[in-house]
Image (tube, grey):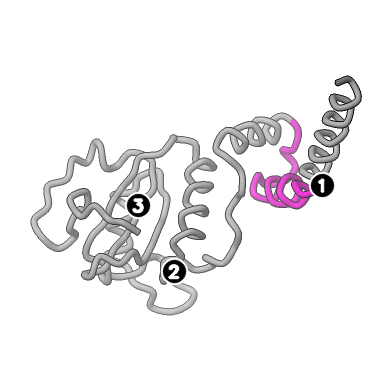
Amino acid sequence: MRLNRDKLHSIKNDTVIDITVSNRPGLYFLFNQEYKLIYIGESLFPLSRILDHYWKAYLNKKDKKGIGPIFSYFRIISVDNETRIRQHYEKRYIKHYNPEYNHGANRAPYSLTCKQIKAHIMIYEMFFKDMSWYRYINDEVLKKMSDGLAHKKKLRKLRNEKNIIKN
């Protein structure tokens, strides 16, 4: 990963941060002293969450409140106010970069674009309120996606055959 260090903030040095900009909904990336990415998260208030991570440590397996003061730098990227969109991007970044402190990083991210996710959220909100949106995306959309892609491929093949016959 190519890293622009000028865009990182230091948690330990005297860093001036505009909290009106840095605390908007978004993703945050935590780096260690050697600028290695060690954690990715999303939050409605990312700066507050970063401070939670810094001051709280995993004391035991039941208390998972933060990763402790093991990071030195952070970066916040503002993302749409829609929680599910932030979680979508968080999963994709975790899968791509596989930071060492993200638990469950081996879970597959949504292989959908932001536009597709928004469309499925709209469908979920209209028809599937009896289940969580995670379950809807995972069980109703992603598990059946290969069937849908196979069907699209079949339709494309039929359309191409018709075009060949016409010509």
Question: Is disc 2 in contact with disc 1, using a CB cutoff of under 8 Å?
Answer: no
Which of 91/14 is in front?
A: 91
Q: Position of residue 159 (x, y in %)?
A: 84, 29
Q: Which of the two labelled residues, at mark 3 and mark 1, occupies the earlier sequence position? A: 3
**Does residue 100 lie above or below 10 as drawn?**
below
Magenta residues, as a range? 127-147
Q: Amino acid at mark 1?
A: Asp
SS at mark 1 in the image? helix
Quadrant showing the C terminus: top right
What separation in Å lies between label 3 and label 2 (alpha carbons)? 18 Å
Give the overall secondary structure of the magenta segment: helix
Q: Which residue is mark 1?
A: 147
Q: Amino acid at mark 2?
A: Lys
Q: Which of the two labelled residues, at mark 3 and mark 2, occupies the earlier sequence position? A: 3
Q: Position of residue 103 (x, y in %)?
A: 49, 68
Q: Which residue is mark 2?
A: 64
Q: Position of residue 91 (x, y in %)?
A: 52, 54
